Amino acid sequence: MGVVLACVLVPPAVILLGWIASWWGTRRLRWIGLSVAAAASAVCAVIGRDAMGPRTDPHALGCSSALECTDLRPVFVIASGLLGCVACLALVVLTFVIEFVVRVRRKESA
């Protein structure tokens, strides 16, 4: 289960590290990076949803329960995409706040 958890948490971690690294770059780079990360996370969630496949009867496949017959890999892709979207949303709000504070302080010092 540790490998599965790592696969779900890697994209948000990469998004966070990229966001932190973007502060050494331009403002435009930061916003482009967040936009690309949000789009990639949304695509990840859509791909996971499309990979789910049709529901089947557990007895037709010889499984004792529906959970045994279910392939959970798409669920982890969806979780990773949704967690990435939430991380992007939180970082967008944080970026707005930080940039607002920096602009106010620059105006006060000028």
Image (tube, rainbow, N blue to C red):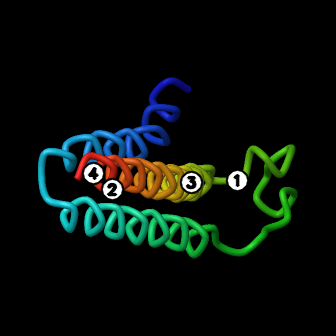
Check disc 3: other Cα within 10 Å, few if <14, some if 14-19, many if 20+. some
Mark 4, residue position: 106
Residue 71 spot, x, y in % from top left: 62, 53
Tell me the kind of residue under disc 4. Arg
* Dot 3 or dot 4, earlier in sequence: 3
Q: Quadrant of residue 36?
A: bottom left
Residue 56 spot, x, y in % from top left: 79, 68
Helix, strand or loop at label 1? It is loop
Residue 66 spot, x, y in % from top left: 83, 51
Tell me the kind of residue under disc 3. Val
Q: Residue at x 43, y 40 (%)?
A: 7
Vertically, is 73 above or below 20? below
The residues bearing labels 1 and 4 have C-alpha atoms spaced at a distance of 56 Å
The residues bearing labels 3 and 2 have C-alpha atoms spaced at a distance of 26 Å
* Dot 1 or dot 4, earlier in sequence: 1
Direction from residue 36 to residue 94 in the image, left or right: right
Mark 1, residue position: 70
Residue 13 spot, x, y in % from top left: 38, 39
* Dot 3 or dot 2, earlier in sequence: 3
Tell me the kind of residue under disc 1. Thr
Direction from residue 47 to residue 65 in the image, left or right: right
Tell me the kind of residue under disc 2. Arg
Q: Which mark is residue 103?
A: 2
Q: Residue at x 44, y 32 (%)?
A: 6
Mark 3, residue position: 86
Circles 1 and 3: CB atoms closer than 8 Å: no
